[in-house]
Amino acid sequence: LNRRLAEFGTTIFAEMSALAVSTGSVNLGQGFPDTDGPQAVAEAAVRAIRDGRGNQYPPGPGVPELRTAVADHQRERYGLRYDPDTEVLVTAGATEAIAAALLGLVEPGDEVVALEPYYDSYAACVAMAGGTRVPVTLRPRDGRFVLDLDELRDAITDRTRLILLNTPHNPTGTVLTREELAAIAAIAVERDLLVVTDEVYEHLVYDDSAHIPIATFPGMRERTVTISSAGKTFSFTGWKVGWVTAAPELTAAVRSAKQYLTYVSSGPFQYAIAEALRLPDTYFTGLRDDLRAKRDLLADGLARAGFGVFRPQGTYFVTTDIRPLGEHDGIAFCRELPGRCGVVAIPHAVFYDHREQGAPFVRFAFCKRTEVLRDAVERLAAL
Ligand code: PMP
Ligand code: GLN
């Protein structure tokens, strides 16, 4: 293994899912739904295969039906206009979009500012691109993990190439507010930075929170690469259909890298997701309402079990503080948890450069069937 990747080892998600299987635990670690997405969307994929659509290499940028559906989605939801031919790129999940954006846009030695804790692939992809990551730590305040805008400003140097943003934020559940996004946008414009923004949880926002793409702020459309994925919105994480929307030069840069990573993404699933994006609004609100109820079920159960609970504004993860349980080390706690009560969770520390900052926090996923969550809550109550 080369020096760029040596520090990363096996991704925590693989490690913890294997632990769940070997111990027969309830897996609230890796974030994937235990129920598939809409049957009609699954049928659309089957139909595409049967009808011979996408069984051979689809076009490099993605099938036109999906690129158009993505452009329509951005316009109808957010008023963002993108040309499906030059400003939309289909990728193998958001994961490839992140990798291709960094490989296509970062020069060796460039600095990439990212919110910490960060989704684990960010660090590895910055390293593969030869960049240097500069984490800005989100800090717990009044039940929410908050970005300190002064810390963000201080993190930017003459070598900063881009800000890698994620909202709704995994693992903390923070949804950046209009004011926070406006401030980040102003910094990006003032310092002439690109923003790569991971918005895979765009439809999973609760209560009074709203998802606002940073590309909608003044001066941002031309400097923002927006990334999303069908995995979260349609509960088909195994299909690995993601996409990028960005100005033509930025899309071309991401495509340059993508064409040598996977060349193209799986064909029939693209046709199915093109249909999924056109589901009526009741689908999206139904998903959100279902997950909000599950959030409350798990968050309340964790609170009763003695955890400090950060009720998320978005995503399908609850972050907890284990210090009220008399614990301090989330990594050790998560390794022991299957043995102690048969539940798997993810320690925040693995998403930090400043590991001590993340040490007492542990993430639980609630994208699971209600009876599974009830079972988990009962097990956790016995801690
Ligand atoms: N970004 C974030 C913040 C995520 O949580 C995930 C989880 N899968 C991804 C990207 C990857 O998405 P995909 O499965 O579409 O590659
Ligand atoms: N995004 C999901 C999570 O954060 C799954 C990640 C993965 O398996 N790579 O848990």
Image (cartoon, rainbow, N blue to C red):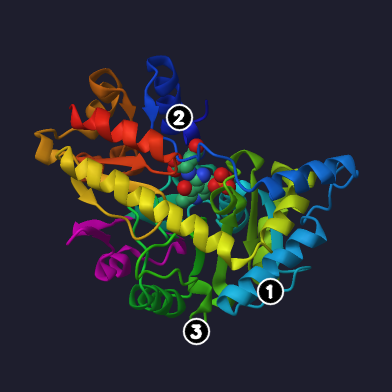
Seen in the image, is 35 located left or right of residue 341?
right
Q: How many neighbours does mark 3 have within 10 angstroms: few (below 14), some (14-19), or many (20 or more)?
A: few
Residue 130 seen: no
Determine the residue positioned at 77% across, 57% down.
Answer: 61
Q: Is mark 2 within 8 Å of ligand 2?
A: no
Q: Are marks 2 and 3 in contact (CB under 8 Å)?
A: no
| 354 vs 275, nearest the viewer | 275
Q: Which residues are magenta?
A: 136-165
Residue 239 seen: yes
Query: x, y percentage for residue 228?
Result: 57, 57
Residue annotated with mark 1:
82
Q: Is residue 146 above or below residue 190?
A: above
Q: Is residue 20 above or below residue 111?
A: above
The alpha-carbon separation of the residues under discs 2 and 3 comes to: 40 Å
Residue annotated with mark 3:
218
Dot 3 or dot 1, earlier in sequence: 1
Determine the residue positioned at 30% across, 51% down.
Answer: 296
Q: Which marked residue is nearer to the observer: mark 2 or mark 3? A: 3
Q: How many neighbours does mark 1 have within 10 angstroms: few (below 14), some (14-19), or many (20 or more)?
A: many
The alpha-carbon separation of the residues under discs 3 and 1 comes to: 16 Å
The alpha-carbon separation of the residues under discs 2 and 1 comes to: 39 Å
Query: x, y percentage for residue 119?
Result: 43, 46
Q: Is mark 3 within 8 Å of ligand 1?
A: no
- Circle 3 — which element? loop
Dot 2 or dot 3, earlier in sequence: 2
Query: x, y percentage for residue 197?
Result: 50, 62
In the image, residue 159 lies in the stretch drawn in magenta? yes
The tag on residue 6 is 2
